[in-house]
Image (cartoon, grey):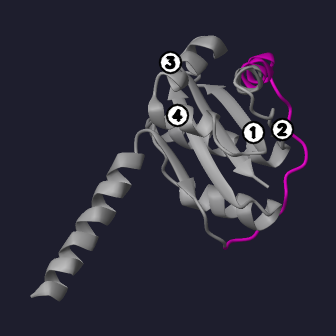
Amino acid sequence: MKVNLLKLMLLLTVIFTLDSCSSDSSEVTADSTSAVIVENYTYSATELETMKLINDYRVSIGLNPLEIINHISYKSEEHDYYMIDNNVVSHDGFVDRSTNIMKLLGAKTVGENIAYNYNSPQSALNAWLNSPAHKKNIEGNYTHFGISIRSNQTTGKKYYTNIFAKI
């Protein structure tokens, strides 16, 4: 009886944990998958501004600025296109993205913020800072990051994926 109760409690804990991360932010510590490190990535002015705002905020509260890694921005871009193609705003595939970054770049931990339909980097950052889970990632013990901001060509709405890593 006690064993069955423990199994049920463990199952409920896993379900609630997965559900609580699906619409905010995620953090993973794992290892697997392999591919090639993407070294070239072209940043838009909006992406550069968003990363500057994040680093300016981190420095203003006594944290280290994060270093940009093109491969992380590439993985962010892949996710933006996934969300646009599937008309979803989600963390689908986060485990695969984070595992790739851990395997190829040696990251110890990885976190992710996403946003949708913000017209300026400042408005996206404000929304993230007003969300405890997103703010935790921005203020997290990370050393590197990447970002992608893509627009849906049909609707014009912007999709943001910002991935953080501790390397």
Q: Secondary structure at mark 2?
A: strand
Residue 134 tag number? 4
Q: Amino acid at mark 1?
A: Gly
Q: Is residue 150 visible?
A: yes
User: Residue 142, relative to residue 89: is it above or below?
Assistant: below
Q: Looking at this rendering, what residue extends furthest in the front direction?
A: 62
Q: Residues within 10 Å of mark 2 (few under 14, many from 20)?
A: some
> Closer to us: mark 3 or mark 4?
4
Q: List x then y, in percent, for residue 119.
A: 58, 11
The residue carrying mark 2 is 68
Q: Looking at this rendering, what residue extends furthest in the left direction?
A: 1
At 22% from the left and 79% from the top, the residue drawn is 7
Q: Quadrant of residue 65?
A: top right
Q: Is residue 156 visible?
A: no
Q: Amino acid at mark 2?
A: Ile
Q: CA distance from mark 4 to mark 2?
A: 19 Å
